[in-house]
Amino acid sequence: MWWREAGKRLVVLILTVAVVVAVASVGPMLLSSDDGGEEAFQNPEYAPDRVAPDPLSATGTVDPSGVEATTNGTVLIDRGHANRFSRADIEPLVDALVRQGFTVEFYTDGDLGGRLADADVFLVIDPGSEYLPGDVDDVRQFTGNGGHLVMMGEPDRTAISSGLLGTSIQTQESRLTALASAYGMSVDTQYLYNQEHADGTFKHLVARPTGQGGLDGVEQATMYTAAAVTTQRGTVLLRSAPNTHKSGSDQVTGEYPVAVRTQNTVLLGDKTFLRGDRFNVADNEVFIAYLVEFMLQGDHQPSETQDTDRTSAGTPTPTPADGDRD
């Protein structure tokens, strides 16, 4: 009869509720450890507080104090090779140069050698096109006559662009091969990262001085899209902290050079540490002051006949086999 069927369903419902209540009360005891505490994670990569280092403090100003600096010189910043940076990206550096009495100018096109004739420093930041042989000769003649060269590269990056035909993915490279190789230097294409020593996240690399090149007052600097750099006969200024990885070889770690110099040339594997929100993180402002002092010491003395025949009149910077080492 109907009342018997209803009774069976009621009994099943009561038993189901009882089982659910029992599991809910016993479950926490089964999941807890013997000592009543929580079990530690066995996979540290899932513990954010252990993977992401704390952000570093940001204080200080760029205060050059070089005693051998020239005055009223000119810094020529390259804009003629599809260089990827905004003026806001280098504002702290430009401000420091202007405070020291230097004039800052931009090269966009035309005769590079003619513009370098009136400059003391040539600053090259993340170029998107390679330097032609004539431009390389002009720059080498410039440094051979006392001018100073600062180059800043970046690792390869992926850029997404959209147009009338749709969206495309492109690889951006720092086209420094021709110019940097003329000085026995190079920039790697892979980015560096470190899960132990970083400014808040693994790509924000911590670098430390080697004790060479006169880099005083820096305990650690930070670079935010860093690539390793090499030099044949120059001095390594900064190396990444221990256990740094390259993006293409995650199992290999090391302490990679990220800043090198010779007598009249500096090469860096990052440009982003110059930004207004990063220039004074850790000891970045002290390192930037060092770069400013290096620039201020540039004393380009063009030969008398350079305007008419720069190729034969100048004294090109020696190749790495003949160059000087600090």
Image: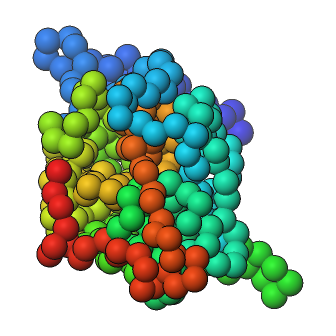
The reply to whether residue 9 is visible in this rendering is no
Q: Which residue is drawn at 35% across and 29% down?
A: 67
Is 238 in front, or is 247? 238
Farthest top residue in view = 36
User: Would you identify the image quadrant in which residue 319 lies?
Assistant: bottom left
- In this rendering, is residue 231 above or below 319? above
The reply to whether residue 166 is visible in this rendering is yes
Q: Position of residue 123 (x, y in %)?
A: 51, 57
Q: Residue at x 47, y 18 (%)?
A: 60
Farthest right residue in view = 164
Q: Where is residue 174 in the image (x, y as percent from the top left)?
A: 48, 70
Q: Residue at x 58, y 50 (%)?
A: 74
Q: Position of residue 187 (x, y in %)?
A: 34, 67
- In this rendering, is residue 218 above or below 116? above
- In this rendering, is residue 207 above or below 115? above
User: Would you identify the image quadrant in which residue 38 lies?
Assistant: top left
Left or right, 315 with reference to 88: left
Q: Position of residue 201 (x, y in %)?
A: 41, 39
Is 84 in front, or is 306? 306
Q: Which residue is drawn at 35% across and 67% down?
A: 144
Left or right, 163 with reference to 231: right
